Every structure is written in structure tokens, then in C-alpha cells.
Amino acid sequence: MRENNFQNIDHKSRTTCYSSSADINESAMLFDNRIWVDSKEAADYLRISVGALRNAVYRRQIIARKFRRRLYFNLNELNRLLDNSIVR
């Protein structure tokens, strides 16, 4: 008969970690000061559709990085793109 190895687990060693308000505020600041955004957030930031953003990436008008089959955009580069676009 097999022995059940799960009986030796100390269930009291499991602790629930609750974040303090300082930790929550710090994580919110890090989230607000992000450098990289995904396609949806970049499209919202530029006020264009996600399809238009992907077309601009395809035409090499916007620089994107791919990580795990997703596109990411640098907010500094998006700001520079907006600053350099002048309508005459």
C-alpha cells in the first residue's frame, strides 16, 4: 500500500500576507510611473485604435518591442512621436 506523503505537511506554516497601506501606495506609484505599456494602453494614449497602432508598427512609424507574443511600447518614445508630429 502507498504511503501518503501529504500527511507530513505542516498546515500552520502557511501564512497569509496582507499588504500595509504603505505597500499599496508604493505599488500604485510604481504602476503610475511605468515606462512600458501594451498595445491597448498605447492606443488609448495616442487616441487611435489598436488596429491603427499595429498598422503604424508595420509601416515602421512607431517602434515596438515584442515579448512573449505581445507588443510593448516605450512611453518616452510615444511622447517623442507626439512632440515631433507638427501639423502645418
Image (cartoon, rainbow, N blue to C red):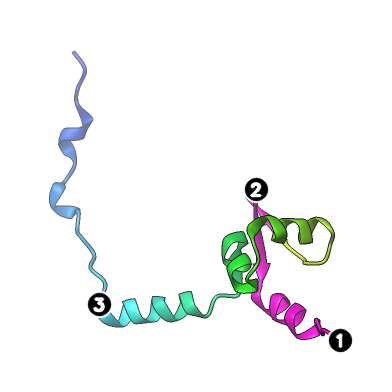
Q: Secondary structure at mark 1?
A: loop
Horizontal placement of 5 versus 86: left or right? left
Circle 1 packing at 10 Å, graded few (<14), some (14-19), many (20+), is few
Q: Earlier in the sequence, mark 1 or mark 2?
A: 2
> In terms of depth relative to the viewer, which is nearer, 65 or 46?
46
Residue plotted at (39% across, 81% down): 26
Which residue does the numbered mark 3 point to in the structure image?
20
Magenta range is 65-88
Closer-to-camera residue (85/16) = 85
Residue 51 locus on image (x, y percent): 68, 55
Q: Quadrant of the C terminus?
A: bottom right
**Residue where numbered disc 1 is placed:** 88
Q: Is residue 85 above or below residue 67?
A: below
Disc 3 or 1, which lies upstream in sequence?
3
Q: Is residue 11 above or below residue 7?
A: below
- Disc 2/disc 3 C-alpha distance (Å): 35 Å
Query: Is 20 situated left or right of 51 in this image?
Result: left
Q: Nearer the viewer, mark 3 or mark 1?
A: 1
Q: Is residue 85 above or below residue 3?
A: below
Q: Secondary structure at mark 2?
A: loop
Which mark is drawn over residue 71?
none
Residue 14 is left or right of residue 23, and the answer is: left
Do the CB atoms of the residues marked 3 and 1 lie less than 8 Å apart? no
Counting residues from the start of the chain, the first of labels 2 and 3 encountered is: 3
Res. 69 mark: 2
C-alpha gap between disc 3 and disc 1: 52 Å
Q: Residue furthest left?
A: 12
Tag 3: amino acid: Ser
Residue 35 picture location, percent across and down: 60, 75
Q: Amino acid at mark 2?
A: Arg
Name the front one of labels 1 and 2: 1
